[in-house]
Image (cartoon, rainbow, N blue to C red):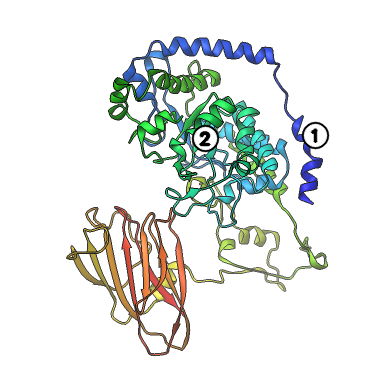
Amino acid sequence: MRSALAILLVPAFLFSCAVKSVAQVASDDAAVEARVSALLAKLSTAQKLEMIVGYDGAYIHAEPTIGLPALLTADGPVGIRNLGPSTAYPAGIALAASFDADLAFAEGSALGRDARARGVSFLLGPGVNIYRSPMNGRNFEYFGEDPYLASRIAVGYIEGVQKQGVSATVKHFALNNEEYDRRNIDSVVDERTLYELYLPAFEAAVREAHVGAIMDSYNLVNGVHASQNSELNQKIAKQDWHFSGITMSDWHSVYDGLAAANSGLDVEMPEGLYMNAASLTPALANGTLSMATLDDKVRRILRVAVRMGWIDHPLSAGSPEADAESRTVARKVALESITLLKNDGNLLPFDAAKLCTLAVIGPNAGQPVVGGGGSALVTPPAATSASEALAAALPRTTNCPGMVYSRGLPTNEEIFHGSQLAHGIREQLFGSPDGTGTPASSQTRATLEPSANPGETPTSVHSARWTAEYIPQSTGPVLVFVALGKQDTVHLSVDGKEVLSLLRPEGHPVVSATVDGIAGKPLHLELSASLKANTEGIGFGHGE
């Protein structure tokens, strides 16, 4: 049914936007290129090298001698992140579920206004990766599994953002098909699958919406990291699609500065760890990097700045008064995204006049859920939980309790605090990455909580081992929980048998395993971890 719907909607999508004449585009391009060339001619090599690396976590360097201001980047695809409260829009998959390119344009326009009000030049969105697995941790940001639908939504979104004088940044280029171990995973793909499934949304973003920036992904594609993948960045995007904007790295996703520079990466974000003056100056001198290649990178930065008008009218943070209108757009997207899959007995919609009691059960209903986390998590000025909204719609009366709520599950903290360990937790911290050698410190702790303060672990500690015994009160399955810090590698064994193993997760997951327990017989638990500096805490708990 959805495939048929997509076909029926083709004419509306294709003709929803006005198209400039070829002569007008050529005239605009000629004027832009002339100004870019004039600005480029005023820059020294040192100034050019500085411009192609980020600084202060989120900026592209200013160059006051030519009137270029610092260019602020900001997450993200569903709202402005890390710059104070901002409207949180529905997830990307919700926008795609509306099947409405005009609504995508409206959301993009609202996001563009939100960005301008905060001095943001580059909005780091939309994400347009196609779903390969339902377990991809960032599926909620993307526009679904249909390349055509994703393309139409992306074009509307990008055109809306850029109409406000803010550059959109389409990401993550390409084949960002899973979050787990994303810096090391290799997406191996044949040419037909690449072009028919994974690239159409990116191509539409470039050819139709004229997106100002592309963000490379962390993963490898056919054996080469995306940030230094010339097939993606040079051949496909810049040569085949004639992409004229900026290709930037995802944050800390560069591994070889010279390879990235020669393979089409224009800006390393958020800082120049590899593609910097120290590595590229000798390359310019010995000819392994040409000045023409460096100039092309700077041209692209200047080209976007000129097209967007930032040199003449630099963006500056003002009053985000447009947020009231943005909330209206966000609400409309939420309503239009609702997809009813089944309605046995015409149960829905509920009739409040006929309801006496409505039971709502589950942790996500008790507090506002405003995003999926990570770089797409936005803090709104205010938010209402599902239970609060339902309670307001179904108030208590003398004879009816109205809406009643139960979380249904204990919190992670309750589980960890409620785990009674026989002799506490023996902790050993090591300076080695693999738990070998003499421990730097040893102690016995009552609990090991996932809420441990960041920075509690000394930076000299690179691995740890915790051991404990748990005595089941009854015979049957025992659920063992482990809370991980970001980028920690963890192994859990119970009675000498490994039951959990997680390699450098991107987020802060709580994972679990089920083991057999016998009443009164201790279970020996051993948790070992390779830690990132200043880990946010690792703990384990268990409950029957």
Percent x, y for residue 221? 49, 43
In the image: residue 187, left or right of residue 13: left
Q: Amino acid at mark 1?
A: Pro
In the image: residue 172, left or right of residue 204: left
Residue at the spot of label 2: 232
Could you tell me how far apart the alpha carbons at marks 2 and 1 are, in whole angstroms?
30 Å
Q: Nearer the viewer, residue 318 or 158?
A: 158
* Residue located 47% across and 41% down the image: 84
Q: Is residue 220 above or below residue 246?
A: below
In the image: residue 119, left or right of residue 446: right
In the image: residue 124, left or right of residue 143: left
**Is residue 121 at least partly visible in the picture?**
no
Percent x, y for residue 2? 76, 49
**Is residue 104 at least partly visible in the picture?**
yes
* Residue located 48% across and 14% down the image: 36
Q: Which mark is residue 281?
A: none
Percent x, y for residue 508? 43, 57
Q: Nearer the viewer, residue 350 or 158?
A: 158
On the image, which quarter does residue 291 sit in? top left
Which secondary structure lies at badge 2? helix
Q: Is residue 449 above or below residue 243?
A: below
Residue at the spot of label 1: 11
Q: Number of numbered discs present?
A: 2
Q: Earlier in the sequence, mark 2 or mark 1?
A: 1
